[in-house]
Image (tube, rainbow, N blue to C red):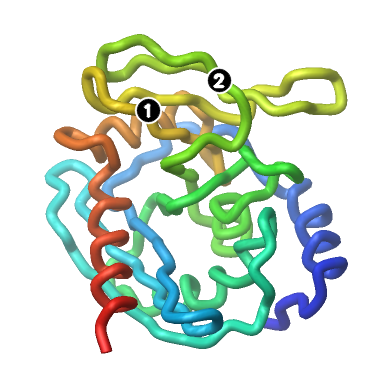
């Protein structure tokens, strides 16, 4: 597919596609497999895309793919998807086990135009998707101490504060992660899936494994 070449075209693409985001879960949505997606960089224009597919119940790794590529889209906050999507889609195309859920290392609705990487991946592929970020995009009050505690993640909207995600405590006393809807899943279900994928550590296994692979490959050679 043709990707936008300019900032104005990229912003226009986000504005157009964000109307296609679905923020509800389909009745009976079943998630047996989940894919972690992440991108690493080697210098300014060399990118490494990773897709790791897990059994969502046992957390066994079912498949993983690493793809290296080049990007010429500039590094601009709010437009990271246009640097990262092409290599991630190539990696996703090569996995042999179809994921029921995409877990992006980044934002979904928690984005200035409510169309972060997780939304873009979900709308493009049609696969339910969520964003799990290490840092907040928006304001929040600290959630409770215990695993599973949440608080609203808010950003300025047309009618005042708008809830764009949740700060989620995945382990007792650890820093929260920030969960936002990407596509075809509701926020409560998204948080429940992140908890299922994070039985021991702060980050879900999808994110941990993908991050480890991107770091390893990006730092080699």
- Relative to residue 152, is residue 176 drawn left or right? left
Percent x, y of residue 32: 27, 47
The one nearer the camera, 198 or 45, is 45
Q: At numbered mark 1, what does the secondary structure look like: helix, strand or loop? A: loop
The one nearer the camera, 32 or 183, is 183
The quadrant in which the N terminus is found is bottom right
Quarter where residue 175 is shown = top left
- Relative to residue 24, is residue 69 drawn left or right? left
**How would you rate the neighbour count of disc 1 (Cα within 10 Å): few for under 14, some for 14-19, many for 20 or more?**
many
Residue at 35% in and 40% down: 30
Percent x, y of residue 37: 39, 61
Quarter where residue 197 is shown = top left
**Residue that label 2 marks:** 140
Circle nearer the N terminus (2, 1):
2
Percent x, y of residue 111: 66, 43
- Relative to residue 27, is residue 5 drawn left or right? right
Residue at 49% in and 77% down: 87
As drawn, the residue found furthest toward the top would be 144
The one nearer the camera, 62 or 52, is 52
Residue at 54% in and 51% down: 118
Q: Tell me the number on the disc at residue 40.
A: none
**Residue that label 1 marks:** 176
| Alpha carbon separation for disc pair 2 and 1 | 11 Å
The quadrant in which the C terminus is found is bottom left
Q: At numbered mark 2, what does the secondary structure look like: helix, strand or loop? A: strand
Above-or-below relation of 73 to 199: below
Percent x, y of residue 159: 85, 20
């Amino acid at each position: 597919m043709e990707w936008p070449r300019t900032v104005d075209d990229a912003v226009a693409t986000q504005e157009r596609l964000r109307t296609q985001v679905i923020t509800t879960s389909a009745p009976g949505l079943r998630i047996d497999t989940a894919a972690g997606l992440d991108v690493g960089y080697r210098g300014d224009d060399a990118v490494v895309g990773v897709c790791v597919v897990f059994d969502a119940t046992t957390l066994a790794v079912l498949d993983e793919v690493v793809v290296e590529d080049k990007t010429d889209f500039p590094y601009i906050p709010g437009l990271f998807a246009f640097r990262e999507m092409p290599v991630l889609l190539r990696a996703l195309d090569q996995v042999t086990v179809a994921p029921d859920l995409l877990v992006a290392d980044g934002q979904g609705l928690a984005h200035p135009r409510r169309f972060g990487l997780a939304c873009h991946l979900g709308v493009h592929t049609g696969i339910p998707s969520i964003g799990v970020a290490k840092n907040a995009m928006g304001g929040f009050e600290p959630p409770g101490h215990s695993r599973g505690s949440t608080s609203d993640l808010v950003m300025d909207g047309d009618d005042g504060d708008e809830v764009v995600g949740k700060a989620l405590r995945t382990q007792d006393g650890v820093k929260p992660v920030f969960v936002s809807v990407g596509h075809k899943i509701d926020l409560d279900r998204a948080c429940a899936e992140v908890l299922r994928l994070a039985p021991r550590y702060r980050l879900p296994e999808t994110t941990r494994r993908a991050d480890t692979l991107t770091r390893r490959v990006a730092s080699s050679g």
